[in-house]
Image: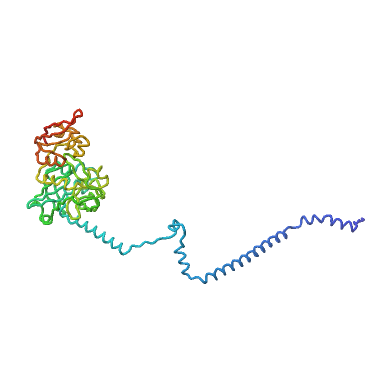
Amino acid sequence: MTIHKKPVDEREHEVEKYQFMKEQVRPQQKKKIAKFAAKIFSAFFLAVVFGSVAGVVFHLINKANDDKDISDYIVETLSPQETKSAENNAENNVVKHSVSPSDLELIDNYDHVSKEIAAIGNSYKYALVKVRGVMGDTTWYDVNNLNSGITYGAIFNITRNECFVVTDSSAVNGMDEVTVEFYNGDEAKASVLGVDSNVNLAVLRVTRSTVPKDARKKIMSIDIGSISGTSNGSNVIAIGAPNGIMYSVMLGKVIKSDIEASIADNQISLYSTDMACVSTSNGIVLNTDGQMIGFINNKFQNLTGEKNMAFVSVNSVHDILELLMRGKNTSYLGIEGVDVDSTTAEQHNLVRGIYVTSVYLGSPAYMGGMRVADVIVKVDGQSVKNIYALHNTLIKNKSGKEIKVEVSRKIKNIRKYITLSITLS
């Protein structure tokens, strides 16, 4: 068999002809390795450059700081420089306050004075008694309350054979005898001499021989003073049960003085304090001389404030206490009124006297024909130009007595004088 070989130039031509196929199928691994190596070299180069720059900067900073003292950093940290903004200063600066020795002395003096004033109230513990009166409508939550049915009592007069105690009328009203308990726990019976619901006061009498010996040696009476000199800002001491707890002491100031309040046939003077009142507040009020100047009374909160403890001045009820101590009550007419002075009379075409603002239904005044807008001018021929004069006149008259009351009444735009016959009760 004959083998035909291609010429040499044809074989070389075929090699060149398929050369492009060898290039297409050549592995690409070498190119990838080259690119990866280039990236590593670049990263290394950049790291070297960055590290060199950072080292130079760090070296320069350390060199500059070598000249500074550590105290410079402390000052700059704790006391930042002032800025133009006061608001920023308030937020960034912590101001430290301290109490000077003089301030501490003032505080100590204030505490000392407060304790001295409180000591005045505490010194009267043997002049105070618990009065066990009417329990009232006891409910499930106060059956075991130790203070249920208990109110204060203050001994205001001691004779050879008797002690007289003033207390809250609401606890003893309608009772002839109650029990009083002294500070040491001893008890004695007390008779109810008189009650005046208008001023919420009652007077009890305790026979001294019935008081246990130990308590009899220690009991004392409270001095009755005068409201004169007590004005806004005056310090006062409340004792008895001013916060509803017996033998408690509260300190306060008068914030409104000489508040006039109308009651039946009279007018009383009230004083409002900055002490907080509770529904069970009762007791007496002392001045800083330790004298009784009033009785806690929160019946007139529209005048004295809903949250403020108030008291009736002792001057307004002193004559009532004297009357109750003798076992007598004030005769009852049954009106409320305001004084008509000469200026008011001229401005409103009235006469001087007592302008009747209220007549109690079923009262002696109502039954006798007195009406609102009458002006009381005379009682039993004696002029009465103010409510206090009327009150003093009623004190002198006994219950059941018939009196003549002259009033000025407007009838068809003309004021006429009418005389009424009224039987007091």
Q: Can you give x and y, in whole percent of width and height, for residue 403 in the image? A: 10, 35
Please state, as top left, top right, bottom left or bottom right, where the N terminus lies in the image. bottom right
Q: Can you give x and y, in whole percent of width and height, for residue 243 in the image? A: 23, 50
Q: Residue furthest top?
A: 412
Snapshot quadrant of residue 64: bottom right
Say if residue 425 shows up in the picture: no
Depicted 252 relative to depicted 413: above or below: below
Q: Nearer the viewer, residue 391 or 423?
A: 391
Position of residue 8 in the picture relative to residue 397 (left or right): right
Q: Nearer the viewer, residue 371 or 22?
A: 371
Say if residue 383 shows up in the picture: yes
Q: Can you give x and y, in whole percent of width and height, for residue 365 in the image? A: 15, 34
Please state, as top left, top right, bottom left or bottom right, where the C terminus lies in the image. top left
Q: Can you give x and y, in whole percent of width and height, for residue 321 in the image? A: 13, 46
Q: Nearer the viewer, residue 160 or 396?
A: 396
Depicted 145 relative to depicted 404: above or below: below
Position of residue 395 in the picture relative to residue 138 (left or right): left
Q: Nearer the viewer, residue 241 or 105?
A: 105
> In the rendered view, how is the structure colored?
rainbow
Q: Residue furthest right?
A: 2
Disc count in the image?
0
Snapshot quadrant of residue 140: top left
